[in-house]
Image (spheres, rainbow, N blue to C red):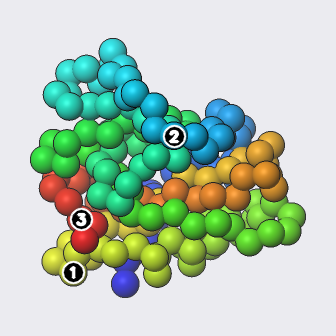
Amino acid sequence: MVRTSLIAFCLAISLIGCAGDPAPAAFPEPEPAATPETPPEESAIPGAERFPATVLRPGDCIEPLPTTFDVTVVPCDVPHSAEFATMYILPEGPYPEAEMARLVEEGCTPRMRIKESRMDEVGVWGLGPGRDHWPRYRTVYCMAVPVDGQKLTGRVIK
């Protein structure tokens, strides 16, 4: 089982709009993969490319931890903040503000295929919709994050 990090949940809660934080930027509509951009701030990392979260694939390594639904994918051999594992759809109903952290953990953890040798190193972190985008968007993007607050190197997802 994947361990849950308090640091990871604090970040997840602020990104998904809990605790009164503003919602992230508009949730992108699903669309075919666009030509990736190399943002200037990540240009120091060779191979860094910016994509909408909707086109992430399991094993994509991300640096820095995203604050919007546009993420920067980097080679996994460089230190990175997260690795995309999977996604899942939150259940229908009212916006689950008070239960978002629990729903992220319960929805992401069983779907994440973490390498057995790396299970103690990672926790779960979710990038999901804010209140302003509910109920139209209910997708949570599940990511493995280091429980020690440092960076990951190499792949943790099978």
Residue 67 location in percent, x, y? Answer: 52, 37
Q: Is residue 120 above or below residue 154?
A: below
Q: How many marks?
A: 3
Tag of residue 116: 1
Q: Residue at x 39, y 63 (%)?
A: 85
Q: Specify whether 34 is left or right of 49.
A: right
Q: Amino acid at mark 2?
A: Pro
Whole-angstrom CA distance, mark 3 to mark 1, is 9 Å
Question: Which residue type does callout 1 highlight?
Answer: Glu
Task: Kindly check if marks 3 and 1 are in contact, taking CB atoms under 8 A apart as contact.
Answer: no
- In this view, the residue in front, 148 or 1, is 1
Instruction: Decide: is 44 above or below 20.
Output: above
For residue 52, the mark is none
Residue under label 3: 156
Q: Return the residue at label 2.
A: 32
Closer-to-camera residue (121/32): 32
Q: Residue furthest top?
A: 40
Q: Check contact, mark 2 vs mark 3: CB within 8 A.
A: no
Amino acid carrying label 3: it is Val
Circle 2 SS class: loop
The local secondary structure at tag 3 comes to loop
Looking at the image, the residue that sits furthest to the right is: 94
**Quarter of the C terminus within the rendering:** bottom left
Q: Earlier in the sequence, mark 1 or mark 2?
A: 2
> Which of pointers 1 and 2 indicates the residue nearer the eye?
2
